[in-house]
Each structure stands twice: as C-alpha cells, then as structure tokens.
Amino acid sequence: MRKAMFSVTLMATVALSAHAQKVTFEEYDLDNGMHVILHQDNSAPVVTTSVMYHVGAKDEDPDKTGFAHFFEHLLFEGTENIERGKWFKIVSSNGGRNNANTTQDRTYYYEVFPSNNLELGLWLESERLLHPIINQIGVDTQKEVVQEEKRLRVDNQPYGRWREQMFVNLFKKHPYRWQTIGSLEHLASATLEDFQKFNEIYYVPNNAVLVVAGDIDIPTTKKMIQNYFGPIPKGKEIKRNTFVEDPITETIKAEFRDPNIQIPAILMGYRTPAQTERDAYVLDMISTYLSDGRSSKLYKKLVDEKKKALQVFAFNGSQEDYGSYIIGGLPLGGTSLEDLIAEIDEEIVKIQQELISERDFQKLQNKFENRFVNANSSVEGIANSLARYHMLYDNTNLINTEIDIYRSITRDEIKEVANKYLKPNQRVILEYLPEETKAN
C-alpha cells in the first residue's frame, strides 16, 4: 500500500512539473546601462510593463530612513507631461491597472494593460524615469499619505511592530535593522533637496531593469523601448557600502509592549545567509516543514493535539545581504511563553538530531513544485520574477532552474543546516506583550 501511495505521489509530481513550461526570454542592455528583459506570450491579449530599481531601505542614510518607500508613492505624483493626480486615471481609463512595492533591497513599479496599450505602459515608465516632478506640494502630500499608512499598518495594527522590534535586535550594523517604512521624524525633517538628491542618485537607467512580458512582438517592442528609454542619460556610478555583522554568540532577550493586543506572542529570530546561498533554500524547506499548513509539525502538535497555541509560524525571510529565520507563536489558555519556547525547541532539536521521514520529505518536494508552477502562471508574476532574479541573484534563468535547487536538497542537508543556524545561543528571543494595566 505504501509503495502504491508513493507511486501516485511521484506521478503527480512528474505531471505537475510537466505543466511548468520553460519561460523563454531575451535580455540585453541599452547604451545607458538599463537592462531589458522581454518575455513573449501571445496566449492572451495582455501585457505587463515593469521597472525594478536597485534601491531599497538598505540604501538609505541612517538619519534619513524611509526614503525608498516614500519614493514608491512620490513617483506617482506626476511628470512634466503627466498632470499631477492624473497617473492612475490614465491607466484605468485605458483598461489597465498599476501598482508599486518596496522592500529593503529594491523598488518595483508595474502596469498591466491590454496588449494594444503596450506603448502607453512604456511611455508612463519612461516619464517616471526621465521627467519626474519632485516639488514641495508633492512631497507634503505624500508625507501625509505615508503617515496615515504607518498609523494604519504599523502603529495601530495588532502585532504591527514585531518586525521593527525583532530586527533592531537581530542587526546592529546593517541597514536591515530599520524597516522599509522608515521614520516619520526623518521624513518630516527632510528637505526638498534631500528628496531630489535621492532621486538623482538611484532613479537612473543604469540602476534599473525594464521587463516587458506578455502579448508582444519582439522587434516592435525593442524599437519602442529604444525610442522611449534609449535617450535617457546614464546616471553616475552608484557606490554601495558593505556591512558585516558580528556573529550572535549569546541569546539576545528583548521585550516590547503593544497597546493593541491582549494575547502575548513569542518570537525567536535567527540571522541567516543571503538569499543566493544554498543554505537559504534549505531553510525555506525547514520553515515549510515546521509550520506551513495544518499538517505541519508545529501546527499539529501545538494547535491541534496539545492545544497550547492559538497560532504558530515559521518563515525564512531571505534577502540580498542577509536573511532572517523567524519562528514563534501565540499561547493558548494557561500556556506560558517559556513553555511555548520549550515545545518549539523540541521540534527544532528533532530536525537537528534525526532525518525527517521520506514521506514528509516528499510532501515538501510537492509543495515546492506547486509554488514553482504557481509563480510562473501569469505574465504579471513572470515579469516580477525575471526582474528579481536578474537584479538580486544575477541569474535571470533561475526562473526556470531554481526548482532544481530545491529538488537537489537532501534530508541530510536539512539536518545539517538546522544544526548550523538554529542554535539557542545564536538567536533573539522577543517577548511581544500586551501593555501593562496600571493599578488604581
């Protein structure tokens, strides 16, 4: 019976892989240093135009944080040829949609249009790059927007400040110690010249990847790209600093009180390697094994069986320079935070001392196959992946081959990596507590 089940699982995996067709693409550089990636898929009359800039929170001055995220908003204000406040109206009135997002490593802008509006998408992004208007009225408007965003998503959100409190302890030298949204005080005190200088340094073609994916004709698209982006002047060479953290050798204990919660949480954070390292991929598998879904080890043990936790979580946040592995949960009933730590540590020790079962290992492989297929299921997702793999991994073809890394990981490696990084003396333990009630 077990052999039959294994055969069915194996056939399902093979069938799934067969549907993950290779993503074809062409890439080249413009004379101004902009990297271009084209992906043609004529199966639906849709096209994505996107630009990823190699600037995130880690590129900011420690005394002027939040600039990269601020620019995610600011560069929708308008340009010399797009009236202020009209950007989104232009997109929606032409059957499109658009958005942007920022991380600590990069900023990403994109539009999705009917393919007959490809040229409009290219024009919009070239306008953002060549003719942005950065003036006081735009800066003041977006300061209010960001202030409200921080209040809603961070300050007044239950557990909204856990990242802030974890990373200020996990990193002491690297800019990963502050969050992408940055400091409202820094933004409030920044001058118009500060913002203009930031734009001049980072929003240049030689710091950007342009991706066009979808229903396109390659020669026609190349001509449009040359017309709109070719004349944009190359920016100055960007000097990037390198930050090397000292190893964590003793447990760092931290506490934070959040007035927006009633149930405490425990979070344990481990500093891990850059996303390009093989160990980062292994840690992805470990986090999935421990807490991805109701059948995961921690969920079954602490939520279903022992009923000691309302919620458990484990995730590996890989980034360009370092990663972070976070694991924790919310206790249930009379369970103490110390008891929750002990229960979680018990499962980590099992991974460190024993090989996970063949059955669990196959389940892991199936989950990563699923993720791989889903990531490449739309031209919008493909555009994002192509830009990210080129910019942050220096290997665009990982869009086709990254799954092979996961497939090659062994049970022995899972045990080895757990022992290497998930040590009690190499972590931050953050007690995230409700605000204390004052006695009358």
Image (spheres, rainbow, N blue to C red):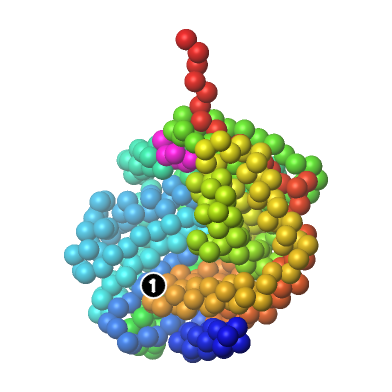
Farthest-out residue, left: 93
Front residue of 303 and 156: 303
Q: Is residue 203 visible?
A: no
Specify the quadrant that holds the N terminus. bottom right
Q: Is residue 341 visible?
A: yes
Residue drawn at point x = 46 percent, y = 70 percent: 384
Residue drawn at point x = 26 percent, y = 68 percent: 96
Residue drawn at point x = 68 percent, y = 56 percent: 347
Farthest-out residue, right: 249
Quick check: is 267 in the magenta stretch? Answer: no
* Lateral position of residue 354 relative to residue 59, left or right: right
Front residue of 74 and 115: 115
Residue 260, x across and y down, in percent: 44, 33
User: Quadrant of the rendered structure where residue 317 is?
Assistant: bottom right
Farthest-out residue, top: 440
* Lateral position of residue 324 relative to residue 192, left or right: right
Please, is residue 34 above or below residue 11 in the view?
A: above
Residue drawn at point x = 78 percent, y = 46 percent: 425
Residue 74, x across and y down, in percent: 38, 49
Front residue of 328 and 171: 328
Residue 280, x across and y down, in percent: 66, 65
**Which residue bears the numbered disc 1?**
380
Q: Amino acid at mark 1?
A: Glu
Front residue of 186 and 284: 284
Please, is residue 243 above or below residue 159 in the view?
A: below
Magenta segment boundaries in residue numbering: 154-161
Determine crowd level at label 1: few under 14, some 14-19, many 20+ residues with C-alpha closer than 10 A.
many
Please, is residue 74 above or below residue 136 in the view?
A: below
User: Quadrant of the rendered structure where residue 316 is?
Assistant: bottom right
Q: Secondary structure at mark 1?
A: helix
